[in-house]
Image (cartoon, grey):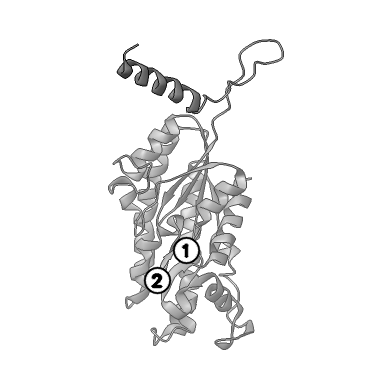
Amino acid sequence: MPRFALVVALLTALAACTSTPPPPASPPAPDGSAPAPVPEKKIHLSIGDSYATGFAPGGKNTSFAQIVAETAGLRLVNLACDGATSADLATRTACGPDAGGKTQLDAAAETLKGGNVDLVTIVIGGNDLTPCAIVQDPVECATRTVAGIQTNVAGVLTELRAAAPDVKIVGLTYPDVFLGAWVNPSFPNGKNLARLSVTMFQDFNSRIAAQYGKFGARFADVTTATGGYGALTELAPDPKYGQIPVSVAKVCSLTYFCDRTDVHPTPAGHQAIADAVTAASR
């Protein structure tokens, strides 16, 4: 054998001996039939704003959506975008690796048509309402804004139900972050804003919950779950702010609003929201 051919033969044999063997095939079933395929993991489909993405000052927290999916043993498909408004769901490109260049609504409908979604969560409206905190008449602003949110949410739910009529949908609300204005020095009239915010959230939650109900969706009242409707006359000691209303102390521990004027949840806040969503989805 010529020397070159001998070298090629030796190298080929060496490669065959050292290459990684293919993984063993799944053993056949006891009756000799082919093994059953492993079922694909069910999906938790999340749409909405930065509460779903886990946005936080200086980085990301584990979001309530991640916690809900992990607790339920679901694969998370998260289309939510930081800063999204209710109108953006149908007009702005979705975020995350599953977006595919589509809007949140279009990408969600496509995912639903695959027939493997177990749960849909929607958190939206906070970015619509936030500007109302600094206007002269925040209640009038909120009343007008909520009407627009209702219209946009109805449009989203119509499309989701058309894609999957029986899928479980949970809409959710927010902690009453504006209670934190009670102690936040950025708001000279903070106590008044905190008092007004209770009415704002009661109106927002009742009207949005009713909209979800029209489409057979469940509602997680996160404001209630985070103590938002407690009497502002009920005080408790706080290590940083002294004697303050219990509901204010709660929002200070569950969000970054009191000391950073940031509406996003702390890790404890995301856990509280996840617990509320999980309870509503049962």
Q: Residue at x 42, y 78 (%)?
A: 260
Q: Tell whether label 1 touches label 2 (CB within 8 Å).
A: yes
The answer to whether residue 110 is above or below residue 272 is above
Nearer to us in this view, 9 or 45:
9
In terms of secondary structure, where does tag 1 sit?
helix
Q: Residue at x 63, y 81 (%)?
A: 234
The answer to whether residue 73 is above or below residue 232 is above
Question: For residue 222, which quarter of the picture?
Answer: bottom right
Mark 2 — residue? 139
x%, y% of residue 207?
46, 56
**Can residue 196 be seen?**
no
x%, y% of residue 116?
50, 32
| Dot 1 alpha-carbon crowd within 10 angstroms: few under 14, some 14 to 19, many 20 or more | some
Mark 1 — residue? 203
In this rendering, position of residue 53 left or right of residue 248 = left
- CA separation, marks 2 and 1? 9 Å
x%, y% of residue 189?
41, 86
